[in-house]
Image: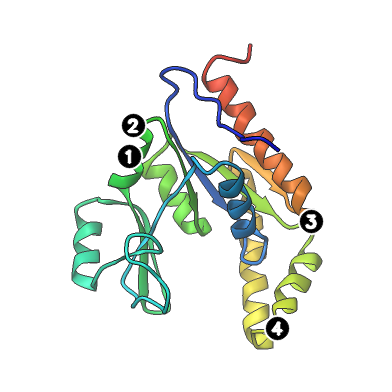
């Protein structure tokens, strides 16, 4: 296979890549494939007020903070985006992202739609990609295939997914995840074609 390397022309600016899409669409899997093939890409670590789960490492899995500290980060504008889910807060600390980008690194943020919308305000130069299911039916069968949720929870998730899919055109690129390898190929094209254009390598 050989090593894959991100094209790093001299002085090539780092960048923030935001990946979003409805729950169950396969964002996490695509991100893991990207990091495996391009280990020099940095996955942004979120801050959270929830307690660590077994096996989670502070500063690797999450930055674990208490609620007053999290509220202080929000008040001081130290988060690129944040949200509250089921009583816990999650957010993306700005400083580690900015430090990486200043070094010329690529930083990937895999987040929910609302967070991605916040990033458009807090970091307008981010390159934003939306992952779509081939169809709502296919997304439904993927969500049901997990076998972990009640009917009510599944329907709620699907309603939310439909609303999120309607906003896909707010993003720079839309990628349909019909076949994982094909979708990953489209993701690579989207990232590297854009980079070549940014660095002046493409006419």
In terms of secondary structure, where does tag 4 sit?
A: loop
Q: Residue furthest front?
A: 2
In terms of secondary structure, where does tag 1 sit?
A: helix
* Of the two numbered discs 4 and 3 in the rendering, the one whose residue sits closer to the viewer: 4
Pick whichever, 11 or 26, lies toward us: 11
Distance from disc 1 to disc 2, alpha carbons, whole Å, reads: 6 Å
Q: Which residue is mark 1?
A: 98
Q: Does 199 sit left or right of 153 as displayed?
A: left
Quarter of the C terminus within the rendering: top right
Pick whichever, 78 or 30, lies toward us: 30
Cβ atoms under marks 1 and 2 closer than 8 Å: yes
The colour mode here is: rainbow
Distance from disc 4 to disc 3, alpha carbons, whole Å, reads: 20 Å
* Residue 47 placement: quadrant: bottom left
Cβ atoms under marks 4 and 3 closer than 8 Å: no
User: Which labelled disc corresponds to residue 102?
Assistant: 2
Which comes sooner in the sequence, label 1 or label 3?
Answer: 1
Quarter of the N terminus within the rendering: top right
Q: Which residue is mark 3?
A: 134
């Amino acid at each position: 296979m050989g090593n894959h390397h991100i094209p790093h022309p001299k002085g090539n600016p780092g960048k923030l890549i935001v990946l979003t899409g409805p729950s169950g669409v396969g964002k996490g899997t695509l991100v893991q494939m990207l990091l495996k093939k391009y280990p020099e890409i940095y996955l942004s670590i979120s801050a959270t007020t929830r307690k660590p789960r077994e096996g989670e490492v502070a500063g690797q899995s999450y930055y674990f903070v208490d609620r007053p500290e999290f509220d202080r980060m929000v008040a001081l504008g130290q988060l690129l985006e944040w949200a509250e889910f089921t009583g816990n807060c999650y957010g993306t600390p700005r400083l580690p992202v900015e430090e990486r980008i200043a070094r010329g690194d690529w930083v990937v943020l895999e987040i929910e739609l609302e967070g991605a919308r916040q990033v458009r305000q807090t970091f307008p130069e981010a390159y934003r990609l939306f992952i779509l299911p081939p169809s709502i039916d296919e997304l439904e069968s993927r969500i049901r295939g997990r076998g972990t949720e009640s009917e009510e929870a599944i329907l709620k998730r699907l309603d939310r997914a439909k609303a999120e899919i309607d906003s896909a055109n707010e993003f720079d690129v839309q990628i349909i995840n019909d076949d994982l390898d094909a979708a990953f190929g489209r993701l690579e094209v989207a990232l590297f074609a854009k980079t070549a254009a940014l660095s002046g390598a493409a006419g």
